[in-house]
Image (cartoon, rainbow, N blue to C red):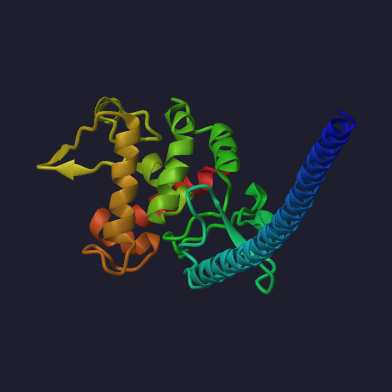
Amino acid sequence: MKNKKVIITMVVTISVLLILGIVISVINISKANIVKVAKNDEILENTNTENQTQENNTEETLEEVSEDDSERIDTNNMQEARSAAINNNSIIGTLSSRSEVNRSGSMYINTNADSYQASDEYEELKQYIKIEDVRISFDMDVSKTTGLSKEDFVTLVTNMKYDRTGILEKNAAWIWECCQKYSVNEIFVLGICGIESAWCSAPQHQNTHNYSSLMSGGKLIPYSSDAAGFEAMIKLLGQKYLSPKGSLYHGATITGVGRCYCNPTSWPKKVYTCMQQVFK
């Protein structure tokens, strides 16, 4: 009986030891797996960090490249704009004296061609003179405008005592614009109206809106409005009488126009007398 107890005790002891051994082995294996997982996590974290660093470096590189490209683009744009500005100045520099004043009566010049910037480099150059500085003469070149601004020309016509009908005053701004467009002296136009239609007072001229006696078939040509009549007159003078290429050109003077317009002996003097009356 005693031996049996001993045997049982030994069996139990061995079983306990085996169980402990198995438990210890399991624990060691778990620790090893935990360490391995930790190392894998560390490796993965390091890898992610390296990848993030590379991505950041790539983004910075792309930003630098983008900035460089932007600078190159801006430089190209500046060069193109600068070239355009210089070209514009070259065009302005080649304009003739009859082309320097446009419909607005002004032109622009570049004040700093060496370093292009914004439109602040440009300043408006007025070509206008004062009313008291206008000069006329019998032999003047009537293909050149007076140099008055539109406002001053309107003021001059408004103060004319011979414009009793008010037709010239009402159309003064339009007359000025047409004279700039076709290169005709504004005072010369007024003088023609003065002699041909008695300062726009003759009924037949008012009915046809033809204040310069433009004829066809021995009759006054009728126009739809005063504006149409004035432009037809000024256009004819500029293109046919005062242009060297015009079919009726005999010099850009009052006498030269009179050779075909009316009577070269008396007409020029009468027109010039009316031109003088504009300033009285």
Quadrant location of the N terminus? top right
Quadrant location of the C terminus? top right
Considering only vertical position in the picture, is 16 above or below 78?
Answer: above
From the top left corner, tell me how far across and down residue 60 is, in percent. 71, 61
The residue at the point 65 percent across, 65 percent down is: 71
For the residue pair 68 and 243, the one nearer the viewer reads as 68
From the top left corner, tell me how far across and down residue 77 is, in percent. 57, 64
From the top left corner, tell me how far across and down residue 187 is, in percent. 48, 48
The residue at the point 40 percent across, 40 percent down is: 194
The residue at the point 40 percent across, 35 percent down is: 199
For the residue pair 64 and 120, the one nearer the viewer reads as 64
Considering only vertical position in the picture, is 246 above or below 192?
Answer: below
Mark yes or no: residue 264 visible. Answer: no
Please identify the residue farthest to the left as the structure is shown: 217
- Report the side of 75 relative to 53 (left or right): left
From the top left corner, tell me how far across and down residue 259 is, in percent. 27, 61
For the residue pair 126 and 67, the one nearer the viewer reads as 67
Please identify the residue farthest to the front as the structure is shown: 1
Q: How many marks?
A: 0
- Report the side of 30 relative to 55 (left or right): right
Considering only vertical position in the picture, is 70 above or below 83?
Answer: above
Mark yes or no: residue 194 visible. Answer: yes
The residue at the point 41 percent across, 56 percent down is: 183
Displayed quadrant of residue 6: top right
